Image (tube, rainbow, N blue to C red):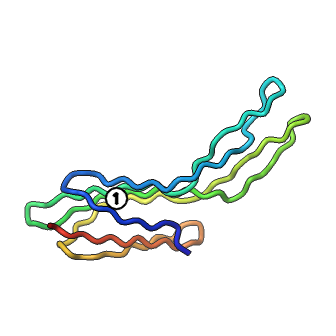
Amino acid sequence: MVVDNFAGSTTDGHTQPHSNISLIKYRDSVTKGKTNMADLALGTKASITPHITSDGRISLRFNVDYVELEKMETVKVGNFTIDQPRTGGFKHAATDILASGEKREYKDLDNGAEYIYTVSATKQ
């Protein structure tokens, strides 16, 4: 299963953002006899920032934040029903140095699932 997949191109010192977010509406609360709706953001937000080092290699700083809906429980409040979303996911941040043309794979095990990040860098 692929959680997310993206490719981007950026220059020295400039951050390449990535967002693959879906908003789902849920019944958040009840005020004065009216159900209040809210948005829950699910998916991936990521960024990668390269820097060319003094020896010509590429320093990469990357951040990944992934949120998934694990369960949507409901609770009765008087005559109303509200939702209580339970989310899971992971955050991953790292800095690494690669030679131009090098490709590196990072594996992370969170919540019983394996996530694989593949990063490559090419100096042009």
Which residue is at the far top?
32
Task: Tally the marks.
Answer: 1
Quarter containing the C terminus: bottom left
Residue at 81% in and 48% down: 74
Is 3 on the left or on the right of 31, as rendered?
left
Quarter containing the N terminus: bottom right
State whether residue 118 is above or below residue 54: below
State whether residue 60 is above or below residue 120: above
The foreground one among 85 and 22 is: 22
Which residue is at the far left?
55
The foreground one among 21 and 48 is: 21
Which residue is identified by label 1?
62
Identity, as a three-letter code, of the amino acid under mark 1: Phe
Pointer 1: residues within 10 angstroms few (<14), some, or many (20+)?
A: some
Residue at 36% in and 66% down: 7
In percent of width and height, residue 64 lies at 43, 58
In percent of width and height, residue 31 lies at 77, 26
In percent of width and height, residue 32 lies at 81, 23
State whether residue 69 is above or below residue 6: above
In percent of width and height, residue 14 lies at 24, 51
Residue at 60% in and 48% down: 23
Residue at 34% in and 59% down: 62
Is 7 on the left or on the right of 52, as rendered?
right
The image quarter containing residue 97 is: bottom left
Is 71 on the left or on the right of 123, as rendered?
right
Q: Secondary structure at mark 1?
A: strand
